[in-house]
Amino acid sequence: MLTLDDLYALETSDNQLVSWKIFRRGEALPDNIRTTCLEDGETVNNRYIGFAMGFWGDRQWLYSGVEQTAPATHAALMAASDLYMVLSQDIMSEGHWKTPQWYIESGGRLVQLAMQVAVPDCSAIRQGPMVHGHYLRAKPVLGHNLALAFCSHIGGMKIPDELPMGLAPGRLPGGALDWKVIYYAVLSEIYGVKSNFEEEFERAKPDVDQIFARLGYSGEQAEGTVRVFFDTGARDAQIRDYVLIQTPKDRERIIRGEDGEPVLYFVQQSDWQKIYVLNNPSVAIDNYVAHMLRNEAATFDFGPYLGEWK
């Protein structure tokens, strides 16, 4: 379990290729990282400039989308530490600090928060999280509540298990770039197929196609139309739960519930023969994320939220 002590240890690491610097709110930032938005007519010409979004406003502003639709998560975030910004600089970019990474310490462990790095127009950022590009892209897939909470000002979360940041387990809702295509993960998890060129691929593929056909997607459509919003397993976990979302290119094909919101699916303990409908997904995921942010010892129980299985 990583803590703030591990984060600050980056600054004194003996890495000869990359140096690290940790910043807190109110500290002077490098010239190429700004906390101000773009006023009317202003442009950014320096390709190295990045936006310290976590320091643009206070935490109440940053978590305003979460507060509106994920109250348990919002309470956990407000109980956590303030933000820490991490910048890196390698020997090829001396004098220019690279893209900010953002961390909080919650429940005694580090959590990474994803945010935009492009400097926004002031007119856009002042309109609130529902004009954010992440939200607009995610809403057709996740519905209003989940998109506003986890794909607006905050564009996803991770619990890192190594620093500097590697490929972290997806134990918290990730942004659109982290939504893994699940089709080939199923091939790998059930049959051990790692490549389309393996002999077992042709034997296994029809079985996997049947799994996705139960979700309304078949043939070539299946390969990119169901993705992982997050799973509950640590890096070395052999068995994990999955929350699945529909991401067809034609958003009109998304299967929706009686409330008009996209249907989310749930795979319990890697049992792909039973894919459940996740009832009240925004409530279920809000409670799960709050549970994880508080770092509670017990395993979160999705059972009360599981509907029929396909």
Image (tube, helix red, strand yellow):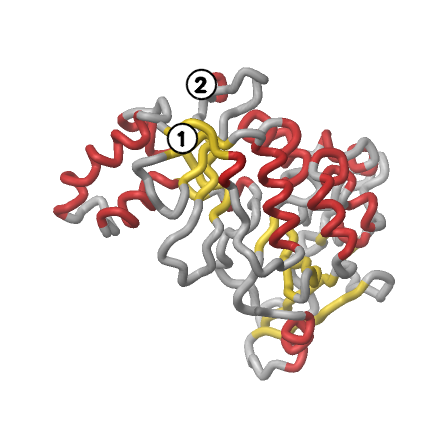
Give the CA separation, mark 2 to mark 1.
10 Å
Identified at 22% across, 48% down, the residue is: 191
Residue 118, compared with residue 4, is above or below; it is: above
- Could you tell me if residue 120 is visible in this image? yes
Q: Provide residue 230's location: percent of width, then percent of height.
A: 50, 45
- Could you tell me if residue 100 is visible in this image? no
Mark 2 / mark 1, whichever is N-terminal: 1
Q: Which mark is residue 119?
A: none
Of the 4 image quadrants, the one containing the N terminus is: bottom right
Residue 26, compared with residue 63, is above or below; it is: below
Q: What residue type is disc 1 on?
A: Thr
Judge left or right: residue 20 versus residue 253.
right
Instruction: Check if mark 2's residue and mark 1's residue have beta carbons within 8 Å.
Output: yes
Judge left or right: residue 172 versus residue 54.
left
Q: Mark 1 — residue?
A: 225
Residue 94 placement: quadrant = bottom right
Q: Secondary structure at mark 1?
A: helix
Identified at 72% across, 48% down, the residue is: 45
Q: Provide residue 114's location: percent of width, then percent of height.
A: 64, 50
Judge left or right: residue 199 versus residue 270.
left
Identified at 79% across, 37% down, the residue is: 125
Q: Mark 2 — residue?
A: 253
Of the 4 image quadrants, the one containing the C terminus is: top left
Q: What residue type is disc 2 on?
A: Arg
Total labels: the figure holds: 2
Identified at 53% across, 34% down, the residue is: 305
Q: Provide residue 122's location: percent of width, then percent of height.
A: 82, 38
Q: Provide residue 267's location: percent of width, then percent of height.
A: 40, 40
Residue 83 placement: quadrant = bottom right
Query: Callout 1: few (<14), some (14-19), or many (20+) C-alpha neighbours within 10 Å?
Result: many
Residue 275, compared with residue 168, is above or below; it is: above
